Image: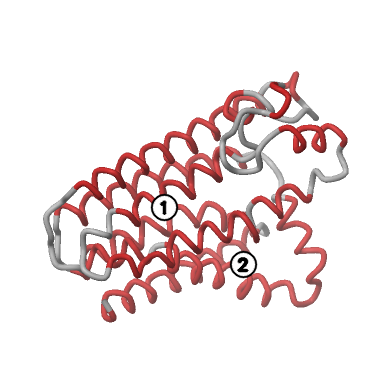
Protein backbone atom coordinates (compact mmCIF):
# COMPACT_ATOMS: atom_id res chain seq x y z
CA UNK A 1 0.00 0.00 0.00
CA UNK A 2 2.92 2.36 0.61
CA UNK A 3 3.68 3.20 -3.03
CA UNK A 4 0.03 3.60 -3.96
CA UNK A 5 -0.64 5.74 -0.90
CA UNK A 6 2.38 7.97 -1.58
CA UNK A 7 1.37 8.51 -5.20
CA UNK A 8 -2.20 9.25 -4.19
CA UNK A 9 -1.15 11.58 -1.37
CA UNK A 10 1.16 13.52 -3.68
CA UNK A 11 -1.65 13.87 -6.20
CA UNK A 12 -4.01 15.21 -3.55
CA UNK A 13 -1.51 17.72 -2.19
CA UNK A 14 -0.87 19.03 -5.69
CA UNK A 15 -4.61 19.11 -6.31
CA UNK A 16 -5.28 21.12 -3.14
CA UNK A 17 -2.44 23.51 -3.99
CA UNK A 18 -4.12 24.27 -7.31
CA UNK A 19 -7.42 24.96 -5.53
CA UNK A 20 -5.63 27.23 -3.05
CA UNK A 21 -4.19 29.28 -5.93
CA UNK A 22 -7.62 29.46 -7.57
CA UNK A 23 -9.14 30.61 -4.26
CA UNK A 24 -6.68 33.49 -3.98
CA UNK A 25 -7.38 34.54 -7.55
CA UNK A 26 -11.15 34.41 -7.06
CA UNK A 27 -11.07 35.87 -3.56
CA UNK A 28 -13.21 33.15 -1.97
CA UNK A 29 -12.02 30.17 0.04
CA UNK A 30 -15.38 28.41 0.00
CA UNK A 31 -14.47 26.77 -3.29
CA UNK A 32 -12.70 24.32 -0.98
CA UNK A 33 -16.15 22.78 -0.41
CA UNK A 34 -16.41 21.95 -4.12
CA UNK A 35 -12.85 20.60 -4.05
CA UNK A 36 -13.83 18.19 -1.26
CA UNK A 37 -16.10 15.94 -3.33
CA UNK A 38 -13.95 16.09 -6.47
CA UNK A 39 -10.87 15.24 -4.41
CA UNK A 40 -12.31 11.83 -3.55
CA UNK A 41 -12.80 11.15 -7.24
CA UNK A 42 -9.12 11.94 -7.78
CA UNK A 43 -8.19 9.57 -4.93
CA UNK A 44 -10.29 6.78 -6.44
CA UNK A 45 -8.88 7.24 -9.96
CA UNK A 46 -5.22 7.62 -8.96
CA UNK A 47 -5.25 4.73 -6.49
CA UNK A 48 -7.13 2.51 -8.95
CA UNK A 49 -4.63 3.00 -11.76
CA UNK A 50 -1.51 3.07 -9.58
CA UNK A 51 -2.71 -0.02 -7.70
CA UNK A 52 -3.10 -1.84 -11.01
CA UNK A 53 -5.38 -4.51 -9.52
CA UNK A 54 -8.74 -3.85 -11.24
CA UNK A 55 -10.81 -6.27 -9.19
CA UNK A 56 -14.64 -6.20 -9.14
CA UNK A 57 -14.50 -4.76 -5.63
CA UNK A 58 -12.13 -1.96 -6.65
CA UNK A 59 -14.34 -1.02 -9.61
CA UNK A 60 -17.47 -1.02 -7.45
CA UNK A 61 -15.93 1.07 -4.65
CA UNK A 62 -14.33 3.52 -7.09
CA UNK A 63 -17.64 3.82 -8.95
CA UNK A 64 -19.50 4.58 -5.72
CA UNK A 65 -16.97 7.29 -4.84
CA UNK A 66 -17.27 8.76 -8.33
CA UNK A 67 -21.06 8.97 -8.05
CA UNK A 68 -20.97 10.49 -4.56
CA UNK A 69 -18.17 12.97 -5.21
CA UNK A 70 -19.65 14.23 -8.46
CA UNK A 71 -23.13 14.70 -7.00
CA UNK A 72 -21.78 16.51 -3.96
CA UNK A 73 -19.55 18.85 -5.97
CA UNK A 74 -22.36 19.72 -8.40
CA UNK A 75 -24.77 20.32 -5.53
CA UNK A 76 -22.38 22.65 -3.66
CA UNK A 77 -21.50 24.53 -6.86
CA UNK A 78 -25.20 24.99 -7.67
CA UNK A 79 -25.95 26.09 -4.10
CA UNK A 80 -23.15 28.68 -4.00
CA UNK A 81 -23.54 30.05 -7.53
CA UNK A 82 -24.48 33.73 -7.51
CA UNK A 83 -23.95 34.07 -3.75
CA UNK A 84 -21.17 35.65 -1.73
CA UNK A 85 -18.52 33.70 0.12
CA UNK A 86 -19.83 31.30 2.75
CA UNK A 87 -20.11 33.10 6.16
CA UNK A 88 -17.77 30.58 7.81
CA UNK A 89 -14.96 31.38 5.40
CA UNK A 90 -15.75 35.09 5.41
CA UNK A 91 -15.41 35.14 9.20
CA UNK A 92 -11.96 33.52 8.98
CA UNK A 93 -10.98 36.10 6.35
CA UNK A 94 -11.77 38.84 8.88
CA UNK A 95 -10.22 37.11 11.90
CA UNK A 96 -6.94 35.99 10.33
CA UNK A 97 -5.90 39.43 9.09
CA UNK A 98 -2.33 39.55 7.75
CA UNK A 99 -1.98 35.79 8.24
CA UNK A 100 -4.96 35.08 6.02
CA UNK A 101 -3.08 33.68 3.00
CA UNK A 102 -0.79 31.42 5.03
CA UNK A 103 -3.57 30.16 7.28
CA UNK A 104 -5.80 29.59 4.26
CA UNK A 105 -3.07 27.46 2.69
CA UNK A 106 -2.42 25.42 5.83
CA UNK A 107 -5.76 25.31 7.68
CA UNK A 108 -8.19 25.24 4.78
CA UNK A 109 -6.56 23.57 1.79
CA UNK A 110 -3.65 21.46 3.05
CA UNK A 111 -5.52 20.32 6.14
CA UNK A 112 -8.50 19.41 4.00
CA UNK A 113 -6.22 17.40 1.74
CA UNK A 114 -4.87 15.49 4.74
CA UNK A 115 -8.35 14.80 6.13
CA UNK A 116 -9.54 13.75 2.68
CA UNK A 117 -6.77 11.16 2.52
CA UNK A 118 -7.67 9.81 5.95
CA UNK A 119 -11.34 9.45 5.07
CA UNK A 120 -10.46 7.79 1.76
CA UNK A 121 -8.12 5.16 3.24
CA UNK A 122 -10.67 2.35 2.67
CA UNK A 123 -10.80 3.30 -1.03
CA UNK A 124 -7.02 3.37 -1.39
CA UNK A 125 -6.78 0.05 0.46
CA UNK A 126 -9.32 -1.68 -1.80
CA UNK A 127 -7.66 -0.36 -4.96
CA UNK A 128 -4.25 -1.82 -4.10
CA UNK A 129 -5.35 -5.10 -2.46
CA UNK A 130 -5.21 -8.46 -4.17
CA UNK A 131 -8.53 -9.49 -5.63
CA UNK A 132 -10.84 -11.54 -3.39
CA UNK A 133 -14.35 -12.89 -4.02
CA UNK A 134 -17.26 -10.61 -3.21
CA UNK A 135 -19.38 -11.73 -0.29
CA UNK A 136 -22.25 -10.83 2.00
CA UNK A 137 -20.35 -8.00 3.66
CA UNK A 138 -19.91 -6.38 0.26
CA UNK A 139 -23.64 -6.65 -0.35
CA UNK A 140 -24.38 -5.23 3.09
CA UNK A 141 -21.88 -2.43 2.57
CA UNK A 142 -23.43 -1.56 -0.79
CA UNK A 143 -26.92 -1.51 0.73
CA UNK A 144 -25.76 0.81 3.53
CA UNK A 145 -23.97 3.02 1.02
CA UNK A 146 -27.11 3.30 -1.12
CA UNK A 147 -29.16 4.17 1.96
CA UNK A 148 -26.69 6.86 3.02
CA UNK A 149 -26.30 8.25 -0.50
CA UNK A 150 -30.06 8.45 -0.95
CA UNK A 151 -30.53 10.08 2.44
CA UNK A 152 -27.89 12.72 1.72
CA UNK A 153 -29.10 13.43 -1.82
CA UNK A 154 -32.76 13.73 -0.84
CA UNK A 155 -31.94 15.91 2.17
CA UNK A 156 -29.81 18.24 0.03
CA UNK A 157 -32.51 18.44 -2.66
CA UNK A 158 -35.25 19.20 -0.13
CA UNK A 159 -33.17 21.97 1.42
CA UNK A 160 -32.28 23.45 -1.98
CA UNK A 161 -35.95 23.57 -3.01
CA UNK A 162 -36.84 25.15 0.33
CA UNK A 163 -34.18 27.87 -0.02
CA UNK A 164 -35.16 28.67 -3.60
CA UNK A 165 -38.73 29.39 -2.54
CA UNK A 166 -38.86 33.14 -1.73
CA UNK A 167 -41.72 32.52 0.72
CA UNK A 168 -39.24 30.68 2.96
CA UNK A 169 -36.76 33.54 3.33
CA UNK A 170 -35.58 33.71 6.94
CA UNK A 171 -37.31 30.45 7.88
CA UNK A 172 -35.84 27.14 9.05
CA UNK A 173 -36.14 23.96 7.06
CA UNK A 174 -38.04 21.56 9.35
CA UNK A 175 -39.98 19.34 6.96
CA UNK A 176 -39.20 16.24 4.90
CA UNK A 177 -36.16 14.38 6.18
CA UNK A 178 -35.31 17.50 8.20
CA UNK A 179 -38.27 16.67 10.43
CA UNK A 180 -36.45 13.59 11.75
CA UNK A 181 -32.87 14.84 11.91
CA UNK A 182 -31.42 18.34 11.88
CA UNK A 183 -28.72 17.17 9.47
CA UNK A 184 -29.93 14.47 7.05
CA UNK A 185 -27.13 15.32 4.62
CA UNK A 186 -24.46 14.79 7.27
CA UNK A 187 -26.11 11.58 8.47
CA UNK A 188 -26.17 10.28 4.91
CA UNK A 189 -22.53 11.14 4.28
CA UNK A 190 -21.30 9.40 7.42
CA UNK A 191 -23.48 6.36 6.69
CA UNK A 192 -22.21 5.82 3.16
CA UNK A 193 -18.58 5.89 4.32
CA UNK A 194 -19.32 3.17 6.86
CA UNK A 195 -20.84 1.22 3.96
CA UNK A 196 -17.61 1.51 1.98
CA UNK A 197 -15.63 0.38 5.02
CA UNK A 198 -17.76 -2.76 5.29
CA UNK A 199 -16.71 -3.58 1.74
CA UNK A 200 -13.07 -3.74 2.86
CA UNK A 201 -13.77 -6.47 5.41
CA UNK A 202 -13.61 -9.19 2.79
CA UNK A 203 -9.91 -8.40 2.38
CA UNK A 204 -7.09 -9.34 4.81
CA UNK A 205 -6.49 -6.43 7.16
CA UNK A 206 -9.44 -4.47 5.82
CA UNK A 207 -10.79 -3.73 9.27
CA UNK A 208 -7.74 -1.52 9.94
CA UNK A 209 -9.09 1.05 7.49
CA UNK A 210 -11.75 1.95 10.07
CA UNK A 211 -9.74 5.18 10.49
CA UNK A 212 -11.60 6.41 7.40
CA UNK A 213 -15.21 6.30 8.63
CA UNK A 214 -14.10 7.23 12.16
CA UNK A 215 -12.47 10.39 10.80
CA UNK A 216 -15.53 11.57 8.86
CA UNK A 217 -17.79 10.71 11.80
CA UNK A 218 -15.64 12.73 14.21
CA UNK A 219 -15.35 15.69 11.83
CA UNK A 220 -19.08 15.94 11.27
CA UNK A 221 -20.21 15.32 14.84
CA UNK A 222 -17.52 17.22 16.73
CA UNK A 223 -15.55 19.60 14.49
CA UNK A 224 -16.49 21.19 11.17
CA UNK A 225 -19.94 19.77 10.60
CA UNK A 226 -22.76 20.07 13.09
CA UNK A 227 -21.03 22.27 15.74
CA UNK A 228 -19.81 24.89 13.26
CA UNK A 229 -23.09 25.07 11.36
CA UNK A 230 -25.35 25.21 14.39
CA UNK A 231 -23.27 27.94 16.00
CA UNK A 232 -24.74 30.33 13.41
CA UNK A 233 -28.27 29.62 14.65
CA UNK A 234 -27.84 29.30 18.40
CA UNK A 235 -29.36 32.74 19.15
CA UNK A 236 -32.57 32.05 17.22
CA UNK A 237 -35.59 31.05 19.28
CA UNK A 238 -37.10 29.05 16.40
CA UNK A 239 -33.88 27.04 16.12
CA UNK A 240 -33.84 26.32 19.84
CA UNK A 241 -37.36 24.91 19.56
CA UNK A 242 -36.37 22.90 16.49
CA UNK A 243 -33.30 21.65 18.35
CA UNK A 244 -35.40 20.65 21.35
CA UNK A 245 -37.70 18.38 19.36
CA UNK A 246 -35.44 17.12 16.56
CA UNK A 247 -32.54 14.65 16.71
CA UNK A 248 -29.17 16.19 15.85
CA UNK A 249 -27.94 13.28 13.76
CA UNK A 250 -29.75 9.93 13.77
CA UNK A 251 -33.22 10.07 12.18
CA UNK A 252 -35.79 9.74 14.97
CA UNK A 253 -39.45 10.67 15.43
CA UNK A 254 -39.68 14.27 16.61
CA UNK A 255 -40.30 14.77 20.31
CA UNK A 256 -43.91 15.59 21.05
CA UNK A 257 -44.93 14.36 17.60
CA UNK A 258 -44.41 17.83 16.13
Q: Dot 1: within a 10 Å radius of its alpha carbon, few (fewer than 14), some, or many (20 or more) residues?
A: many
Q: Dot 2: within a 10 Å radius of its alpha carbon, few (fewer than 14), some, or many (20 or more) residues?
A: some
Q: Position of residue 124 (x, y in %)?
A: 31, 66
C-alpha gap between disc 2 and disc 1: 22 Å
Circles 2 and 1, Cβ within 8 Å, touching? The answer is no
Q: Position of residue 230 (x, y in %)?
A: 74, 47
Per the rendering, the mark at residue 108 is: 2
Per the rendering, the mark at residue 193 is: 1
Point 61% across, 73% down: residue: 105
Give the left or right position of residue 22, taking residue 123 as reference.
Answer: right
Residue 30 or 185: which is nearer the viewer? 185
Per the rendering, the mark at residue 88 is: none
Up-down relation of residue 89 to residue 186 (above or below) = below
Point 66% across, 42% down: residue: 248
Residue 201 or 62: which is nearer the viewer? 201
Quadrant where the N terminus sits is bottom left
Amino acid sequence: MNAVFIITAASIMGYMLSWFIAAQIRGRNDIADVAWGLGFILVAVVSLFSGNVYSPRSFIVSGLVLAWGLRLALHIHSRNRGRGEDPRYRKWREEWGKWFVLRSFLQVFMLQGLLLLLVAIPVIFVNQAQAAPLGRLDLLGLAIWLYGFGFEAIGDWQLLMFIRNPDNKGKLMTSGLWRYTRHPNYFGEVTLWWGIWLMTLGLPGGWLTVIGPLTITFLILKVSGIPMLEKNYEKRADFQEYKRRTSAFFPLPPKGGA
